[in-house]
């Protein structure tokens, strides 16, 4: 039997077309894998962003609720305390109702303490609207009420008010401290207004930018806020709070806090 040539015997057989992958198939597989990885990463990123936005909104919501509760409790607990005027020409022995009501400043005595609630004793509250890097903010200062004579440190004498037809105290500017509490931040604008009791049979109410009454507290206090519109962030709600103790005797009101709480509602316009 004739022998098969060595070259022919060792000749390789052609490979079957399905035994390997072409370069195009490798490129397509790598591309699909990359697209799948990118989709997964984007999905995780979107989920993380949504969780972060929800967390931030809940945080802002809690801050707004806390701010509303603090302001509401402080204003509801307001007490008409009479202070003793500081020594000066014509001021010795003069007594005055301690309440400063201006468009961007407010001072009063309340039975609510920011740190201890109703158990903290009487407190002097100072509210002020100031500028901040994010717009406007409301600052709160709190100090213990040390008696009528101690209120003289907030007053810088008396002056004649032509509109009032008499004299009223000149309050010193509110000074921000390192311990001042930021109640609301990132506002476009904010102002305080004070409700005057209707006179006679006229049911029309008047919101005043400056409170000049020397013998009574306002019927209610409104805090009008104009938040900055940025995305879908939760916004502070304007509120108005009645003052239940406005007609209470200062000597009787020093120990008790109004029993009825107040439901917040939108503040009226100017």
Image (cartoon, rainbow, N blue to C red):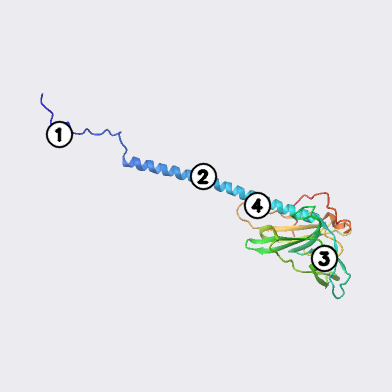
Secondary structure of the residue carrying numbered label 1: helix
Q: Residue at x 84, y 54 (%)?
A: 244
Badge 4 or badge 2: first in the primary sequence: 2
Q: Residue furthest top?
A: 1
The residues bearing labels 3 and 1 have C-alpha atoms spaced at a distance of: 118 Å
Q: Which comes before the other along the chain, label 2 or label 3?
A: 2
The residue beneath circle 1 is 7
Q: Earlier in the sequence, mark 3 or mark 1?
A: 1
Judging by the rendered image, the residue that carries numbered circle 2 is 44
Per the model, the C-alpha gap separating discs 2 and 3 is 60 Å
Label 2: few (<14), some (14–19) or many (≥20) C-alpha neighbours in 10 Å? few
Which of labels 4 and 3 is toward the front?
3
Precedes in sequence: disc 4 or disc 3? 4
Question: Where is residue 5 shown, x and y percent of the image?
Answer: 12, 31
Report the residue at 51% width, 45% height from top. 44
Image quarter of residue 100: bottom right
Whether residue 126 can be seen here: yes
**How far apart in space, not on screen, are marks 1 and 2 (Cα)?**
61 Å
Q: In the image, is 11 to the left or to the right of 44? A: left
Residue 207 vertical placement versus 23 (above, below): below
Do callouts 2 and 3 mark residues in contact (Cβ within 8 Å)?
no
The residue lying furthest to the bottom in this view is 89
Q: Position of residue 158 (x, y in %)?
A: 83, 72
**Label 4 residue SS:** helix
């Amino acid at each position: 039997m004739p022998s098969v040539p060595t070259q022919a015997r060792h000749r390789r057989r052609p490979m079957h077309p399905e035994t390997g992958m072409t370069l195009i198939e490798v490129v397509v597989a790598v591309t699909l894998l990359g697209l799948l990885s990118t989709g997964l990463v984007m999905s995780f990123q979107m989920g993380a962003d949504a969780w972060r936005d929800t967390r931030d909104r809940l945080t802002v919501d809690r801050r707004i609720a806390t701010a509303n509760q603090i302001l509401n409790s402080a204003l509801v607990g307001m007490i008409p305390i009479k202070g003793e005027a500081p020594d000066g020409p014509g001021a010795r022995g003069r007594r005055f109702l301690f309440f400063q009501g201006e468009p961007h400043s407010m001072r009063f005595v309340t039975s609510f303490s920011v740190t201890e609630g109703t158990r903290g004793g009487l407190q002097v509250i100072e509210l002020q609207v100031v500028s901040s890097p994010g717009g406007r903010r409301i600052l709160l200062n709190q100090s213990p009420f040390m008696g009528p004579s101690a209120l003289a440190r907030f007053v810088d004498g008396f002056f004649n008010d032509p509109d009032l037809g008499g004299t009223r105290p000149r309050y010193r500017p509110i000074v921000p401290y390192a311990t001042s509490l930021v109640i609301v931040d990132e506002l476009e604008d904010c102002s305080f207004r004070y409700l005057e009791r209707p006179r006679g049979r006229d049911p029309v109410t008047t919101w005043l930018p400056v409170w000049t009454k020397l013998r009574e507290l306002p019927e209610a206090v409104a805090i009008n806020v104009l938040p900055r519109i940025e995305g879908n962030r939760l916004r502070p709600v304007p509120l108005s709070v009645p003052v239940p103790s406005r007609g209470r005797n200062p000597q009787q009101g020093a120990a008790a806090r109004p029993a009825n709480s107040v439901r917040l509602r939108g503040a009226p316009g100017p």
